[in-house]
Amino acid sequence: MFGALSCIWLGDVLGRRRTIFLATIASMIGAILMASSFSLGQFIVARIVLGLGTGGYTATIPVWQAEISSSAKRGAHVVTEGIFIGAGICFALWIDFGFYFIKNSSISWRFPFALQIVLNLPVLAFIFTLPESPRWLIKKDRFEEARTILAILEDCPEDAETVTLDIQSVQTSLRIAGTGSMKDLFKTGNSRILNRTLLAAACQMFQQMCGINLITFYATTIFQVDLGLGSTTSRVLAASMEICQPLGGLLCFFTIDRFGRRKLMLSSASMMCICMIILAATTSQPNNTGAQVSATVFLFIFNFVFPLGFLGIPFLYATEVAPLHLRAAISGISVATTWLFNFVIAEITPVGFNTIGWRYWIIYACINAAIVPTVYFLFPETMGRSLEQMDLVFEESQNMFAPVKIAKRLPADAAGDAEAKDRVAGEKSLDGSFNKDLEDSDEVERL
């Protein structure tokens, strides 16, 4: 959580690539200390260092991905992170299962921790061969570097009109919003920054509070204690269940830019609510074989429908609703929210099961049911819109319910791009850059 919060400042000072690089080094140092631990004190320090690094890169990578992606493919690019998160969890559980059979040797826990070091090395090796965020470069007045990267990303010459308009659009957004400060995060203002910060944080909170981590963290316990299965069978099922997450993430990859963020979140929350209701009913019958089978099936289904709307999309959505000048800060706060509620779920789940048993599932059924109207009324669609077009959506909004209606009205196509470009032209005419002879007073007032 604190690693993610550090990106509020580091993200804009160092840029996206250097922040990712330093966070990866921190996580690798933590993994080295953890794998080589010979005392509890060293292990605790290792966990803290690893946590700081993990928070840093999980807060920065989605911002970087969003800022180097086109509006048409941004969703698919960023939710790819969800596929690999699911695959990583699955891989980790199978590694743990394999080393579960190694008895009386520290290699059973040292090797899984040391494996993280190997996974960090490609990041350190290749991060600087990839482009820096052109939007961050523009914010830092490094226009020639931004133009070069935009031309590569747009697959066009550097002097192409598309590249020029992209740069002008980012400049206009910065000029309207100002440089920004941390205090702006807690103010509404014309750009509705507080509204956007709360949407980003709420989306990440939903990712944890839907109940996925009570299943992921305690899957073996659920199979063994609640459903009465053997220890080895429980571990095999727990590891197998996680295969569903990358599969669900893959389905999200192919549908995110076709159906949009809202539809996937609404569908996912509705199906997770149904799964939780059925799990409450089936786990209340521990000695019923049919109930055990049904509970196992719906645990698998839950792990498949969760990534459809809430594994990669919260990271994506937080970057899409945030303005450029505070995108790193809002992403840091939203990802810190993820880790905060991740901690909460890990701590309260044993207490919940020990005190109210199968009724604990009902709490998450209610939470998922509450997510549906929240997303429907408060979360505007971002599909197909440039990051600068989303600034328009919030600037025209007068209350927290307005962005959904305005996003529906603002076309998610070339017409929407044209409106954003018109704003660029209008801003230039007002500051005297061109079209100095604009005489229509009504149009001036509108701009």
Image (tube, rainbow, N blue to C red):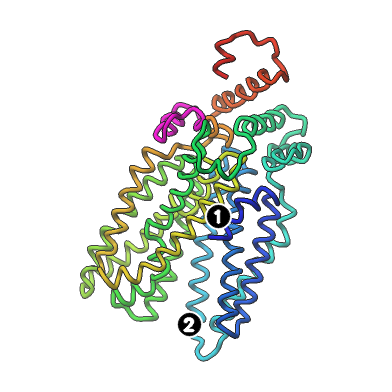
Residue 112 is one of the magenta-drawn residues: no
Determine the residue located farthest toward the top in the rendered image: 439
Q: Residue at x 46, y 44 (%)?
A: 199
Residue 400 is one of the magenta-drawn residues: yes
Counting from the top left corner in percent of width and height, residue 395 is at 51, 30
Q: CA distance from mark 2 to mark 1?
A: 28 Å
> The residue tagged with tag 2: helix, strand or loop?
loop
The answer to which image quadrant residue 37 occupies is bottom right
Q: Residue at x 53, y 35 (%)?
A: 384
The residue carrying mark 1 is 81
Residue density around tag 1, few if under 14, some if 14–19, many if 20 or more, within 10 Å: many
Q: Which amino acid type is marked by label 2?
A: Tyr
Residue in front for this viewpoint, 72 or 327 = 327
Please tell me how many numbered marks the rendered image carries: 2
Tell me the quadrant of the picture where the C terminus can be found.
top right
Residue density around tag 2, few if under 14, some if 14–19, many if 20 or more, within 10 Å: few
N-term-proximal mark, 2 vs 1: 1
Q: Is residue 172 shown above or below 349?
A: above
> The residue tagged with tag 1: helix, strand or loop?
helix
Counting from the top left corner in percent of width and height, residue 397 is at 46, 30
Q: In the rendering, which numbered label is found on residue 100?
A: 2
339 left or right, relative to 25: left
Q: Is residue 402 shown above or below 73?
A: above
The answer to which image quadrant residue 72 occupies is top right
Q: Which residues are magenta?
A: 393-412
Q: Residue at x 67, y 40 (%)?
A: 135
167 left or right, relative to 71: right
Determine the residue located farthest toward the bottom in the rendered image: 104
